[in-house]
Image (cartoon, rainbow, N blue to C red):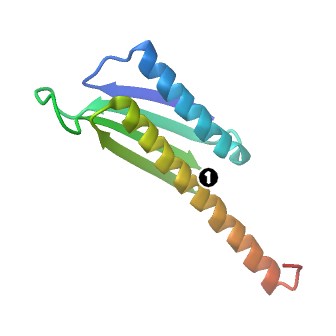
Amino acid sequence: MRFALKSKGIDLTAAINAAVAKSVSSIEKKVARFGESVTCEVEVSKTTKHHKKGDVFRAEVHVRVPGKLVYAESLKDDLYVAINDARKEAERQIADIKGARAEKVRIAKKTKGGRA
């Protein structure tokens, strides 16, 4: 899986890189069956420069699997919580893709006279 990290409005520190790498490794396990054609792009940013409180940190995760684009976004008051929330949402969507494909195979076997 190819991976790219981008930031807007904040500096990328070693701690942010480590948190994103941990999240991406979790996503990578979920999409391993799709092969090397999968790409994951993560963007972390601060939505505003002058606000200090509230949901000011944003994390976006784009995962491109063959035939689908998974998009997850999270706005939180802590950057690391936003990264984890976006990862969880992306993993949920990947699981839905996997379930939908398995359902299509099951229906195809059933309608073509194969074993269900």
Q: Residue at x 60, y 37 (%)?
A: 26
Foreground residue among 48 and 4:
48
In the visual, does 21 lie left or right of 45?
right
In the visual, does 25 lie left or right of 17?
right
Instruction: Kindly indicate the quadrant of the structure image that contains residue 99.
Output: bottom right
In the visual, does 53 lie left or right of 45?
left
**Total numbered labels:** 1
| Residue 85, x across and y down, in percent | 43, 43
Query: Looking at the picture, does residue 99 appear above or below residue 47?
Result: below
> Where is the C terminus found, in terms of image quarters?
bottom right
Foreground residue among 17 and 1:
17
Q: Residue at x 43, y 43 (%)?
A: 86
Which residue is situated farthest in the left direction here?
Answer: 50
Query: Looking at the picture, does residue 107 appear above or below residue 8?
Result: below
- What residue does disc 1 label? 66
In the visual, does 16 lie left or right of 51?
right
| Residue 89, x across and y down, in percent | 47, 50
| Residue 27, x across and y down, in percent | 59, 40
Q: Residue at x 42, y 21 (%)?
A: 16
Q: Residue at x 58, y 53 (%)?
A: 94
Query: Looking at the picture, does residue 80 appear above or below residue 33?
Result: above
| Residue 65, x across and y down, in percent | 59, 49
Amino acid type indicated by mark 1:
Pro
> Where is the N terminus found, in terms of image quarters?
top right
Foreground residue among 28 and 112:
28
Which residue is situated farthest in the top direction here?
Answer: 14
